């Protein structure tokens, strides 16, 4: 039994048909980790996190932007999308600080939010309070529902 496990000789025990694929995946992961510099950090992911809600005449976007001031933001609107970009600055730790976990990243960010319908780019309002950016976007007249009277 030990001889079979050490030297990979097929035995009578049942084998997982996907074990070889899993083994290959682990080997590729190890190879990939070897190519990355030990000081490289993974990307921060999608930032900022947003909620997009819809009312009868508008869309409301709320974005989490802790530590970002309003002068560091750039908001642009097109017919059916909103672009949000800016610069997030996080104070550096003292030299010689040893991180045990680093999840907050600083630097430039950009996010395009596709809207479900057309908007009026001239009627966009934005406010930043306590790290929450609230953007209210009016729907275009053509995309708003109309009440039809029945005769």
Image (tube, rainbow, N blue to C red):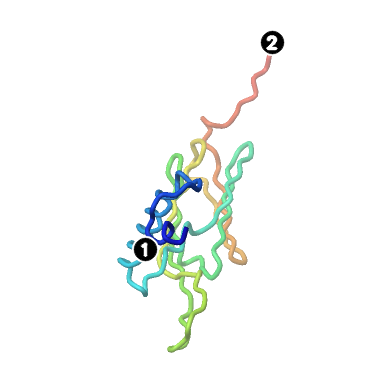
Compare residues 150 and 7 and report the one nearer the observer. Answer: 7
Q: In the drawing, what numbered circle is on residue 151?
A: 2
Check the image and report above or below for 107 versus 85: below
Name the residue tied to disc 1. Answer: 30
Marks 2,1: beta carbons within 8 A:
no
User: What is the quadrant of the C terminus in the image?
Assistant: top right
Q: Secondary structure at mark 1?
A: helix
What's the residue at 58%, 55% (across, down)? 134
Residue 60 in the image: state x and y as whole percent: 59, 47
Residue 70 in the image: state x and y as whole percent: 51, 65
Q: Nearer the viewer, mark 2 or mark 1?
A: 1
Residue 24 in the image: state x and y as whole percent: 37, 53
Check the image and report above or below for 38 versus 116: below
Compare residues 62 and 32 and report the one nearer the observer. Answer: 32
What's the residue at 46%, 81% (across, down)? 92
Query: In 3D space, how far apart are the residues under numbered discs 2 and 1 (Cα atoms)?
Result: 72 Å
Sequence order check: which comes first, mark 2 or mark 1? 1
Q: As drawn, which residue projects farthest toward the right?
A: 151
> For residue 79, which quarter of the picture?
top left
What's the residue at 50%, 70% (across, down)? 104
Compare residues 47 and 134 and report the one nearer the observer. Answer: 47
Check the image and report above or below for 64 versus 148: below
Residue 43 in the image: state x and y as whole percent: 42, 63
Density class for disc 1 (Cα within 10 Å; few <14, some 14-19, many ≥20) is few
Q: Secondary structure at mark 2?
A: loop
Q: In the drawing, what numbered circle is on residue 125?
A: none
């Amino acid at each position: 039994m030990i001889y079979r496990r050490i030297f990979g000789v097929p035995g009578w025990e049942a084998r997982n048909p996907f074990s070889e694929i899993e083994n290959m995946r682990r080997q590729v992961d190890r190879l990939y980790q070897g190519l990355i510099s030990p000081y490289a950090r993974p990307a921060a992911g999608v930032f900022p996190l947003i909620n997009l809600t819809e009312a009868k005449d508008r869309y409301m976007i709320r974005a989490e932007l802790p530590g970002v001031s309003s002068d560091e933001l750039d908001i642009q609107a097109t017919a059916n999308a909103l672009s949000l970009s800016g610069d997030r600055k996080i104070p550096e730790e003292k030299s010689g600080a040893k991180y045990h976990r680093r999840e907050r990243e600083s630097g430039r960010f950009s996010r395009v939010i596709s809207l479900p319908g057309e908007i009026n780019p001239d009627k966009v309002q934005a406010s930043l309070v306590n790290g929450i950016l609230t953007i209210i976007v009016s729907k275009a007249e053509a995309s708003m529902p109309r009440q039809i009277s029945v005769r």
